[in-house]
Amino acid sequence: MKKTVLATLLVMCITSVSLATETNVTTTSHNYDLTAYKTSPFCMAIVKGDLETVRKLIEFGSDVNQKSDGMTPLMYAARYNRADIIKLLVKNGANIKAKDSKGYTAMKFAKQSNAKDAIALLEKLS
């Protein structure tokens, strides 16, 4: 009797484990494109507001007008309201009137982000 009960329990456990296996279903009904962006370290320092790193990178020869993901460093500074970095970039030759592929300037990015300090400074510099 004990052997029959143990055998039945063993069969039930094995059956429940085999029925509980996970199945992954992958669908390919979505149709979309993914775009991977790689922002330069120079522009990432601007986004983070790291003035000292930006200053060092300029000293080491980073181009203040080199686009990263279609935006100039000045556009990043304007978008993230980095007025002190805007001053540094302009002092080192950043082009205030540069445009991205959509025709946006640093001023446009500042206005879209409601970056008040950047807007005031860019108006003063223009």
Image (tube, grey):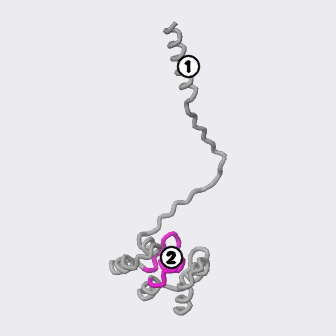
Dot 1 falls on a residue whose secondary structure is helix
Q: Amino acid at mark 1?
A: Met
> Is residue 67 on the magenta stretch?
yes
The segment highlighted magenta reads 64-84
Q: Is residue 107 above or below residue 25?
A: below
Q: Nearer the viewer, residue 93 or 22?
A: 22
Picture quadrant of residue 23: top right
Residue drawn at x 51%, y 63% is 37
56 to the left or right of 20: left
User: What residue is shown at x 47% (from left), y 73% (from top)?
Assistant: 47
Residue drawn 65% across the image and 49% down it: 30
Residue 111 lies within the magenta run: no
Q: Which mark is residue 76?
A: 2
Mark 1 or 2, nearer chain start: 1
- Percent across and percent down for residue 84 are 45, 84
- Residue named by callout 1: 12
Instruction: State the image coordinates of residue 121 (x, y, percent, origin top left).
Output: 52, 89
Quadrant that contains the C terminus: bottom right
* Front in this rendered view, residue 45 or 67: 45
